[in-house]
Image (cartoon, rainbow, N blue to C red):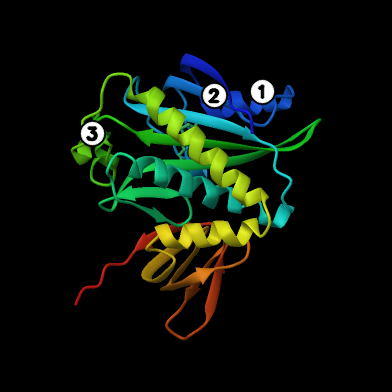
Amino acid sequence: MNITVLTFDTIDSTNTEAMKQARLGADEGLCVVAREQTAGRGRHGRTWVSEKNVGLYFSIVLRPKLETRLLPLITLMTGVAVHDTLQEYGLKPDIKWVNDILVNEKKISGILAETAETTQGLAVIVGIGINIRSSNFPVEIADIATSIEQEDVSVPPAVEGVIFDLLAKYLTYFYDILNGENGPNHIREEWRRRSTYFSGKNVRVVFGNETVTGTTDGLEENGALRVRTMDGDIKIIQAGDVENLRQTS
Ligand code: BTN
């Protein structure tokens, strides 16, 4: 994959711009990066707080050849790449299914994958937000969010560029693996090694109006989460918010 970069000082959302570029025919590997987003988007219609110069706001255009049913593995692959990028800073990240990167159980990065039909075929836009500096997180997320700086890592002024380079390197590496022989198995295995949520975690999963409580029990072929409920049933979670239920005794 050839990485090319479009940078903006301020933009509404790097995902929106990358989607526009994909529809205009951008090749796989086009990255959109901004110092600030005025309408940063998270999953499930949430807002991604994107103040100037406190985070990396990044989106990449992919044109995967994967079978459609395996497309969710792109999110897992991205989680692995973000995990390894952050590890380079001495952090010990965890990946909470499906796409939250945590450090000390607080969210440091989120991933938003969106698809677009274009004249060149299906494009997947993968957006990544990484909290770099300790900013004034809004009160509603202050207890659940962290940043590289907040984890006692000193970050020099131009660190965004270095993080971008690392991220591009790891994304290229793991995307090649995903597209290679036995790629989906490799990516699930890489994800398993980096996530405490793969199995044996007591969780509550909320999707739509439904809630499932149980213990994680591995991934399906497409990356869906398996949860074993108290009565031994296996529920397959294709999308939803996972909450860690800490042991009380
Ligand atoms: C989430 O955890 O809910 C996903 C957050 C994704 C945020 C990134 S920041 C860069 C890109 N542009 C956006 O508008 N969203 C993603």
- Give left or right: position of 157 versus 168: left
Which residue carries the number 2 mark? 32
**Does any portion of residue 92 appear in the rendered image?**
yes
Give the label on residue 210, or none: none
Q: Are marks 1 and 3 in contact (CB under 8 Å)?
A: no
For mark 1, does the 10 Å Cα neighbourhood hold few (<14), some (14 to 19), or many (20 or more) residues? some
The three-letter code of the residue at mark 1 reads Gln
Give the label on residue 21, or none: 1
Q: 170 or 145: which is nearer to us?
A: 170
Q: CA distance from mark 1 to mark 2?
A: 9 Å
Q: Position of residue 223 (x, y in %)?
A: 57, 60
Q: Are marks 1 and 2 in contact (CB under 8 Å)?
A: yes
Which residue carries the number 3 mark? 149
Whether label 1 lies within 8 Å of ligand 1 gets the answer no
Which comes before the other along the chain, label 1 or label 3? 1
Q: Position of residue 186 (x, y in %)?
A: 57, 59
Local secondary structure at mark 3: helix
Identified at 19% across, 77% down, the residue is 249
Local secondary structure at mark 2: strand
The three-letter code of the residue at mark 3 reads Glu
